[in-house]
């Protein structure tokens, strides 16, 4: 039997039903089996993917610049029917700091979940690189313990501001009157399901068929579905990242 590892970001989660559906989609005659593994350290997930220890990964689109090997995008996460497909991230500070300019923010402590996060790391990098004429060469990012801790860190002053995903803020209405509602970045790509050449062409086609319109109401997370990736959105995101890398001199 051919066994493949499916890695995923534990901040995003992966429904058990999806793994069952994935294995069920390849009938017993094909002798193909996927096993899932959660990663909290996304850097280690990326290394394992590049070493070809992992064939399939569900991760933030913000991971793509760090990959050193070839990959294919099979699917993009979705909130499900009747919800916007793209992500929106908004700059939040304490109300007393709401007049802070973007230039000032480049010298302050900015929170992020990690440096692979689309909404909390790449969103402010894209925002600042596009709107600040002479940004600092480095930004003082403070890594927090997840989305909820990042919001709490703005409120209690551990950080001066953060770009916070709107879906996260919806879960914390108690802070709407405490934090400012600043400038936002729209049309950010949702997390992606990517794979590599460990998967034969027949398996890749099966994955595309399964995920192009996949719904799962039991998914214990922000996303409830998978769909075909929005390639134009991904290309725009990657172009914005390249500009931010140039402005801030990022060498990876």
Image (cartoon, helix red, strand yellow):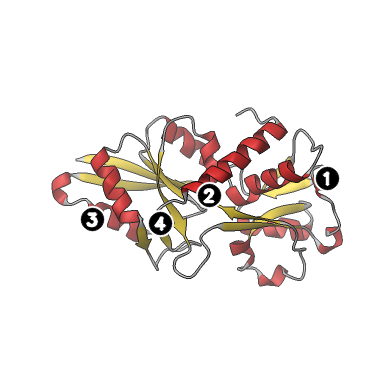
* CA–CA distance in space, label 1 to label 4: 38 Å
- Residue occupied by mark 1: 103
Q: Which of marks 3 and 1 precedes in the sequence? A: 3
Q: Residue furthest front?
A: 232
**Dot 1 or dot 2, earlier in sequence:** 1
In this view, the residue farthest toward the top is: 251
Residue 49 percent across, percent down from the top left: 42, 35
Mark sitting earlier along the chain (1/4):
1
- The correct choice, above or below, for 40 with respect to 97 in the image is above
Camera-nearest label, 1 or 2: 2
Q: Residue at x 76, y 61 (%)?
A: 155
Label 1 CA crowd tier, 10 Å (few <14, some 14–19, many 20+) = some
Residue occupied by mark 4: 227
Q: Nearer the viewer, residue 122 or 4?
A: 122
Q: Secondary structure at mark 3?
A: helix
Residue that mark 3 sits on: 24
- Nearer mark to the viewer, of 3 and 4: 4
* Residue 39 appearing in the image: yes
């Amino acid at each position: 039997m051919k066994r493949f590892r499916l890695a995923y970001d534990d901040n995003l989660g992966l429904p058990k039903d999806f793994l069952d559906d994935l294995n069920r989609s390849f009938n017993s005659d094909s002798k193909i089996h996927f096993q899932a593994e959660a990663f909290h350290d996304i850097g280690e997930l990326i290394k394992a993917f590049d070493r070809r220890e992992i064939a399939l990964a569900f991760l933030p689109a913000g991971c793509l610049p760090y990959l050193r090997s070839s990959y294919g995008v099979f699917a993009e996460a979705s909130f499900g029917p009747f919800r916007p497909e793209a992500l929106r991230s908004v700059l939040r500070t304490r109300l007393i700091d709401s007049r802070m300019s973007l230039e000032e923010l480049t010298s302050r402590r900015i929170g992020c979940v990690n440096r692979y996060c689309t909404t909390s790391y790449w969103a402010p990098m894209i925002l600042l690189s596009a709107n600040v004429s002479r940004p600092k060469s480095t930004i003082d990012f403070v890594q927090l313990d997840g989305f909820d801790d990042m919001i709490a860190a703005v409120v209690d002053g551990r950080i001066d501001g953060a770009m916070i995903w709107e879906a996260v803020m919806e879960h914390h209405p108690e802070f709407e009157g405490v934090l400012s509602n600043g400038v936002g970045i729209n049309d950010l790509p949702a997390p992606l399901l990517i794979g590599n050449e460990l998967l034969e062409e027949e398996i890749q086609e099966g994955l595309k068929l399964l995920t192009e319109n996949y719904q799962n109401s039991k998914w214990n997370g922000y996303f409830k579905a998978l769909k075909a990736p929005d390639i134009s959105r991904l290309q725009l995101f990657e172009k914005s990242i390249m500009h931010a890398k140039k402005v801030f001199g990022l060498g990876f």
